[in-house]
Image: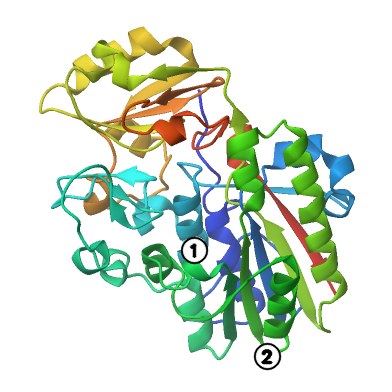
Amino acid sequence: MLDAPRYGSGSLSDLFPSVLACLGVPDEVDRLGLGLTARRVCVLLIDGLGAEALAQRAAAAPFLSGGDPVTLTAGFPSTTATSIASLGVGVPPGSHGIVGYLMRVPGHDRLVNSLRWRLNGEGPTVDLLRELVPERFQPTATVFERAATDGVTVTQVAPGYQATSGLTRAVLRGCAFRPSLSFGDLVDGVVTALRANDRALVYAYHGDLDTTGHVRGPSSDAWSYELAHVDRLVDTIAAHLPPDAALLVTADHGMVELESTVDFDTVAELRDGVVQLGGEPRARHVYTADGAAADVADAWLAHLGADFEVRTREDVIGRGWFGPVVTSEIADRIGDLVVAARGPRAVVRSGAEPLQSALIGHHGSLTPAELNVPLRTFAR
């Protein structure tokens, strides 16, 4: 049985509220017991850096691997859009509403791609930034807005395409944005932003390790070499921290390498009674026809076997997969069934999702390799 993330005491959604509490922002709580005394803090997110993979490749990342290891959990699903939302708003998915990579949003005939903020699949071109206004879709104040209100200078350092994206507007709004052009430029952006005020908060993002893991696999030499570059990046930032500053390094999810797949697009018994298939290969939202959920669950269980958990929406909400609270509006975005992988397999769509189906590395489920992420702290 897969365990729920450690919301409230050891998850990504607890990180920024804990940082804000250490910076003296009112009404914030140091849920993680960070105990930081620094007045300038950078949180660097390394996309795809799982805690298990880091431990297995410690020789490639001696700087990141030093000291006492601390591990957080991502949320469910363990995927970038959901994790960044949990990080940026400081609440679990059941409260911020980004419950998957592809999710149903009532009022739209096609699934919403939450990472790219567009409708999935074929159909009329829709400007989703106008049709699904990010600030209304996720109205809770972000951690950056809360910090800025208390006088903290807040900066995001990330690739330029993220500056005005729907996801940024929904869950990372409220800070200055500096585009990063390279490793060196990311370092300079972080250090410059930390020096901008005697109370400063910086969020930085680096994505190449995740791309390498997806395409080459997290057990590949390419992934290990890329990890070595990430280690050098972290070392360089830490070496150039200004006085009274701290660097916290974490990730949005880990990754597993698939041994086999089940193709939804070619297995008729999986499609019977299914109206839409959301999520991603390791964590699927199955939206069923009215009254068909029980029959669909039986068919999926019979075909998939013990490598997957097939559970109803009510069951996963009750088990806390999406957090202790799930509003009725957000519950409607969750599949009638939620299918999470336990073994090294996934449910792909060779016809509808050919590029994703061909990837070697995947994430999204609640296995330790996907769910557990490192937290490393370096201070001046």
For image coordinates 69% across by 67% down, the residue present is 182
Q: Which residue is mark 1?
A: 90
Foreground of the two, 199 or 285: 285
Residue type at mark 2: give it: Ala
Q: Quadrant of residue 335?
A: top left
Badge 1 density bin: few <14, some 14–19, many ≥20, Cα 10 Å: many
Indicate left or right for 215 with 196 as reference. Answer: left
Q: Position of residue 60 (x, y in %)?
A: 86, 44
For image coordinates 53% across by 54% down, the residue present is 8
Q: Judge whether 110 appears above or below 340 on screen.
A: below
Q: Which residue is mark 2?
A: 196
Q: Quadrant of residue 159?
A: bottom right
N-terminal of the pair, mark 1 or mark 2, is: 1
Residue type at mark 1: give it: Gly
Q: Quadrant of the C terminus?
A: bottom right
Badge 2 density bin: few <14, some 14–19, many ≥20, Cα 10 Å: some
Q: Judge whether 48 appears above or below 16 on screen.
A: above
Q: Position of residue 375 (x, y in %)?
A: 71, 54
For image coordinates 51% across by 28% down, the residue present is 2
